[in-house]
Amino acid sequence: MAFESSAQSGVKPRDIKEYNKALTVDLFRESGDLSMLEVSERTGLSKTTISKLFAEMVQEERIIQSGTGMSTSEGGKKPVLYRLNAAFGYIVFLSMGFARHISCTVADYCGNRIGYYRMDTPEDADYEDGKVLQMAADSVVQMLESLHIPYSKVIGVVIGYDGIVNTRKGTILQSAHRPWEGNLPICNDLKNRLPFDTRVVLNNASVFAAYAELAVDARSQSSRIVINWDENRTLGCSIFSGNQLMENSSGIEGGFSHIILDPSSKIPCRCGRMGCLQSLLSKESVDDYVNRVRGRYPDSALIPLIEAGTFDIKDIFIHGGRQDVFALDLMKHIVNYSSILLYNIFSIYSSRKIILQGVFSLSGDVFLNMLKDKLIHFNNLRLYSDVEVEYSRYSKGKSLSGTDPYIKGAVMYMSDLSFKVGGGKVENAQSTEAS
């Protein structure tokens, strides 16, 4: 949805232009080459507005001419095509949440990965000694130099972290995989180690994976819930209203996986509470349930994996797709807790579309149908029979792995921050508590 006037939207004219510019950039990222007419038709903006917008974006070198399109059936002049200027700027994505390594990915303005570097780090490295931060800063510099990218072309550095973070302050509240203390000002600390000035922002890795869905359907106005569970057991739940990441009453984005679902649970979460989805589906909790019920299924294909110590969360979905009864029991256990979270969200927000990212799709349509059935038969009123549930294109038949969805999401995230929307440049997103 685009805005033609301040009377229509209730916001300042300058904010309207920046929003429409961000919308246009997203359309180019999704579709590649576009004419002014195509952008006008897809945004609902007038040809005059689009013409002025394109003129400004060409002057900024944000978009460039890319050729001519096909004439209409009536003939006439071929339309001029435009595309994003990939060299307009670059975004660096640092994945720093894991215990044994960090990775540095560079993407161009179109969101294409053009460089990747991964390095091992000491598992017990102390934050205070600065070694991991210095390695991260050095990797950024090395990647930019190897790609011959000038510092002036860096739009920003995005840190993806597995743990509980406050994005407004740029701090790690609690690390998921590293033995670090809390309240660590990682954005400022990294910024001070870089030999150039740029914006450094922080968010949970699961939020970037969810943000990648915006790259699939540029600026869709539909509300959606994105639940991601990757092969590293990182679990997150994010809610979007159109392109806006929703926050809860505490100003926390992405913290929905920490809603209390079972107060009787004794397994603690990194958030300091017990009984939230993150703790209920943690490795400790899943392993506890497995050990309690495994005796019922002596012939299950999961038993040899458990006895060998190689059993992992993705095995539940792989063998559930093969109709293994033990795996189906475990999937039902996961569906029960997930559906309680969704009921809570439905009672507050109008979201009726659920996108599942990650290991869920390893079961084929089995998990999808189990969750749909649970939602439809929530009660006799069939309140949620209209809910759409689908797998993400990033997870179709595979685990949520690799850097592609995360870097796509990071580019969308940083792009949003680089535009002035809603009055004044956004310095960071809201606080985030996610796993």
Image (cartoon, rainbow, N blue to C red):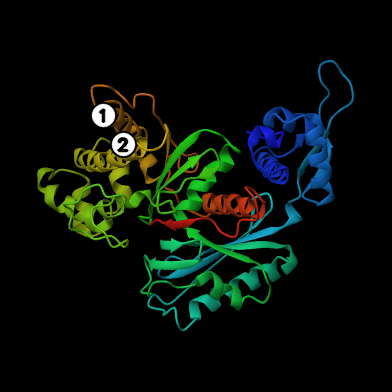
Q: Quadrant of residue 82?
A: top right
Q: Which residue is mark 2?
A: 343
**Residue 294 percent coordinates (x, y):** 14, 48
Could you tell me the amino acid type at mark 1?
Answer: Phe
Q: Residues within 10 Å of mark 2 (few under 14, many from 20)?
A: few
Q: Quadrant of residue 282?
A: bottom left
Viewer-proximal residue among 199 and 73: 199
Q: Is residue 177 visible?
A: yes
Local SS, label 1 = loop
Label 1, label 2: how far apart the Cα atoms are: 9 Å
Q: Residues within 10 Å of mark 1 (few under 14, many from 20)?
A: some
Local SS, label 2 = helix
Above or below — where is 5 with respect to 247?
A: above
Q: Are discs 1 and 2 less than 8 Å apart at CB?
A: yes
**Residue 31 percent coordinates (x, y):** 67, 37
Viewer-proximal residue among 366 and 79: 79
Q: Which residue is mark 1?
A: 378
Pick out the residue farthest to the left.
Answer: 295
Q: Is residue 357 visible?
A: no
